[in-house]
Image (cartoon, helix red, strand yellow):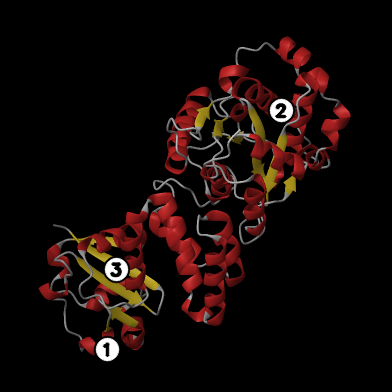
Amino acid sequence: MSTAGRTPGAAILADLERRGLLHDLTDRAALVERLDAGPVHLYCGFDPTADSLHIGNLQSIMLLRRFQDAGHPPIALVGGATGMIGDPSGRSEERQFLNAEVLDANREAIGAQLRQFLDFGAGPAGAELVDNRTWTEPVGVLEFLRDVGKHVTINTMLAKDSVKSRIQRESGISFTEFTYMLLQANDFLVLHREHACDLQVAGSDQWGNITAGIDLVRRCTGDSVHGLTAPLIVRADGTKFGKSEGENIWLSPGRTSAYRLYQYFLNVVDHDVLSLLLRLTTVPVDECVRVDEEHRAEPGRREGQRRLAREVTALVHGPGAVPPVEHAAAVLFGQPIDGVDVSTFDLLAAEVPTTNMDHDDVVGADPLDLLVTSGLARSKGEARKNAGGYSVNQVPLAARDGAPLGPDDLLHGRFVLLRRGRTAHHLVVVAR
């Protein structure tokens, strides 16, 4: 079969390896041979346990995207069935169950997000969106135990890290979660039979579930299929991102704004810049290396973080989201406020502490009163004593000589930007 339009299998894996995206892999030579033989349908699963995916999921989405760009059609599975149970992998306790109505809403929201990153067109590498509830729900428990359960031994399941780690805890693991591995293994079998899917990709915490699926496909069909995992994207404290695991950086603008997403990556530590550029963006490997080298030569300029923040923000929110976010960040870091447009202040109003006030309560007011009202100063005396540490629209309080606020102090007729020190900001928004 012609390989026109497709990247050779060895080149795909070499690129993934250079990007630090290979953690576990089944027979490499066999996978290369299969990739070179013709388009490979591959899948990754996303359980709808929240109404948004998060940064930890972005790496897996980009794995599908990289294979699609290389000519292979991805299948994005949104697990309406497995989402009812919850994957125990990497968790210390059982998930709270969600009802079908919430899961359906989450599934729709996640499906829409996936369409931002993958091409669901009709081309030869067009992506598909599937829900494992469509083939799991009609199957009775006796049929499932007979057709799937008989092929998997308890010994095999107990040996998987996702199960073993939970059994060793006092809380243990419920039978419901214990069966998650069988459901995911069956997903691979169904997708192999009905969608010619020969490869599953995921984060490294899914390796046990993937190998269970590979074994089930072999036992039921005699066919060899493949698995590939990438190292997890983790928080600064080493814990994994998860839709129900505390504070997260979400892909939905309703949960994490473009500004906060940008700021998150702008503040990553130096030694993570190259890894995240390689793993989360489409920037070519050699360019990622060049950016990192330039960053290391002058780390104080944080150009590596800026490039990373731009790339991820553009990927998640669109290129148009980047300029206003950068303008807003620049204002907070001291860029001259003159000439900043109203949309930037509107963005800041959603991101920094804000107080809404009437026009007559601002014009003619003592700046010291505003500093106290905003909470930046505990008292007028404190603000007066430390006047050099406070500013109004970037003008030091001491330089104002006690002048009250006038109409010209209202930027765009609506905004007054207060600051204490270098990082504490507060925006006063005047009612129209």
Between marks 2 and 1, how big is the CA–CA gap? 68 Å
Disc assigned to residue 398 = 1
Give, as a three-letter code, the residue at label 1: Ala
- Tell me the crowding category of disc 3: few under 14, some 14 to 19, or many 20 or more residues within 10 angstroms, Cα based: some
Q: Position of residue 366 (x, y in %)?
A: 20, 77
* Residue drawn at 31 percent across, 61 percent down: 324
Which residue is at a point 51% across and 52% down the rendered structure image?
249
Three-letter residue code for mark 3 = Thr
Q: Amino acid at mark 2?
A: Ala
Quick one: SS at disc 2? helix
Q: Quadrant of residue 370?
A: bottom left
Q: Are marks 2 and 1 in contact (CB under 8 Å)?
A: no
Residue 143 visible in image:
yes
- What residue would you read off at disc 2? 185
> Which residue bears the numbered disc 3?
373
Q: Is residue 51 above or below residue 252?
A: above
Image coords of residue 117 (percent x, y) = 46, 43
Residue at the limit of the structure toward the right, as seen here: 155
**SS for dot 3:** helix
State the image coordinates of residue 215 (x, y, percent, origin top left): 79, 29
Question: Element at badge 1?
Answer: helix
Q: Nearer the viewer, mark 3 or mark 1?
A: 1
Q: Which label's residue is closer to the chain start, 3 or 2?
A: 2
Q: Is residue 423 left or right of residue 132?
A: left
Residue 375 higher or lower than 203, as above or below: below
Nearest the eye: 203 or 373: 203
Q: Residue at x 44, y 52 (%)?
A: 315
The alpha-carbon separation of the residues under discs 3 and 1 comes to 19 Å
